[in-house]
Amino acid sequence: MTLIKIDHQSWIDGIKKAKAAYRVFGPVKEKKDHEFKLLDEDRMPDLDCQNTRMSPKAIIYPQSQIMFNYSLDESKDDCRIMKEVENVSSPQAIIGIRPCDALAFPIVRRNFDTPEYQDTYWVKAYEATTFVGLACSSACGTCFCTSAGTGPFGEEGLDVLMVADGDGFYANPLTEKGRAFVKTAGWTGKADSNAAEKIEQMKTAAEASVTSSVATDRLHDKTILELYNAPFWEQDAFACINCGTCTYICPTCWCFDVQDEISGKSGVRMRNWDSCMSPLFTLHASGHNPRPQKHERLRQRFMHKLKYYVDKYDNGIQCVGCGRCIRLCPVNIDIRSICNKMNNFDANACVCKVTSA
Ligand code: SF4
Ligand code: SF4
């Protein structure tokens, strides 16, 4: 591990230098919330926040993305020919991404970048991006990252891990991309010999601040049909208003819909984030809807994240424990209690031994 010390002035200078070579995104305060934005020449990332309201997934996977355009002008040779729209391929960097949000990208990659199928829009943008993370010094009340495959100092998905120290940072470049970013920023100051030990102590304290957890150890062994038919879905879905907030703010939700939009004699084919919580998501052209009731949609969301994903990839759950869906659900539906119910469900006894979150 080569630890770098970045003092306050080097931090400011480094971000400016990085902007000459990368499109740099970072959290900035917009009204009362922090959001990830492309930083213009004069703007610095504002790291005085725990986690942004929206995750930074839209930087790689925009909420609305034009994939093709075409002409409907019969007088033109290229009438009705789909033309692919150029996607992000120039270097970009996300500064201040938290370890939970960083882990979400390798999780989503399992869906968008497989040996059989590559979503070139997602893959190109992902490969062009350097993830410069910021360790969390303390957890939000709804975070449960340590039982969802990461932690306040988690490294998976990051190219550089920074740890705040006073008005400066320690930086640990983890990958070639990370080393290239640090070099571009001119961050070369060597950390003191006691820095590694100090960081280890900070990490232990930060992990201890995560007081929420979920049990996932028995999900893999459950039978899909038994969980599917469990009696708690209707009760848990009762308050849901199908607003879709939980899916839009989730860093690991990846579903989209493709639509054509035509204006005059030109058209675009675009994809837009979609939500399994919406009745329209599964509505067939015939009028049939395989998930017409809200408990069926809520069940789909949690079965996907906590059972289908678990069985398909055998690599944890499709959730990084960021806690956003708990904080922002208007009716307090809590993935922690549903995960515990699923994990503890006993079909034979037909009771849910619920463990509190
Ligand atoms: S945020 Fe809450 S109310 Fe809205 S769709 Fe999700 S579970 Fe239902
Ligand atoms: S399901 Fe909820 S806690 Fe898990 S990653 Fe998505 S928003 Fe965060």
Image (cartoon, grey):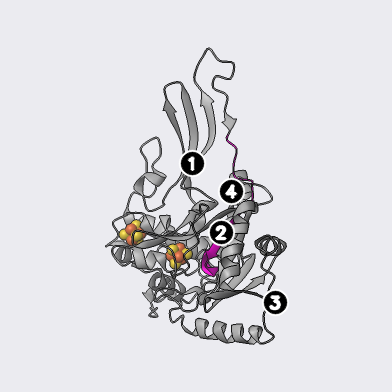
Q: Residue at x 47, y 70 (%)?
A: 321
State which quadrant residue 169 falls in: bottom right
Packing grade of label 3 (10 A; few <14, some 14-19, many >=20) is some
Residue 230: mark in rendering: none
Binning the other alpha carbons within 10 Å of mark 2 as few (below 14), some (14 to 19) or many (20 upward) gives many
Q: Earlier in the sequence, mark 2 or mark 3?
A: 2
Q: CA distance from mark 2 to mark 3?
A: 23 Å
Residue 309 versus residue 149: which sits nearer the camera?
149
What residue is pinned by disc 1?
Answer: 271
Within-10-Å neighbours for mark 1: few <14, some 14–19, many 20+: many
Please state if 210 lies on the left or on the right of 122 as rendered: left
Q: CA distance from mark 2 to mark 4?
A: 15 Å
Gap between marks 1 and 4 measured at Cα: 12 Å
Give residue 284's position: percent from left, percent from top: 40, 39
Q: Which residue is mark 4?
A: 122
- Amino acid type assigned to the residue bearing label 3 in the image: Lys
Residues at circles 2 and 4 in contact by the CB criterion of under 8 Å: no
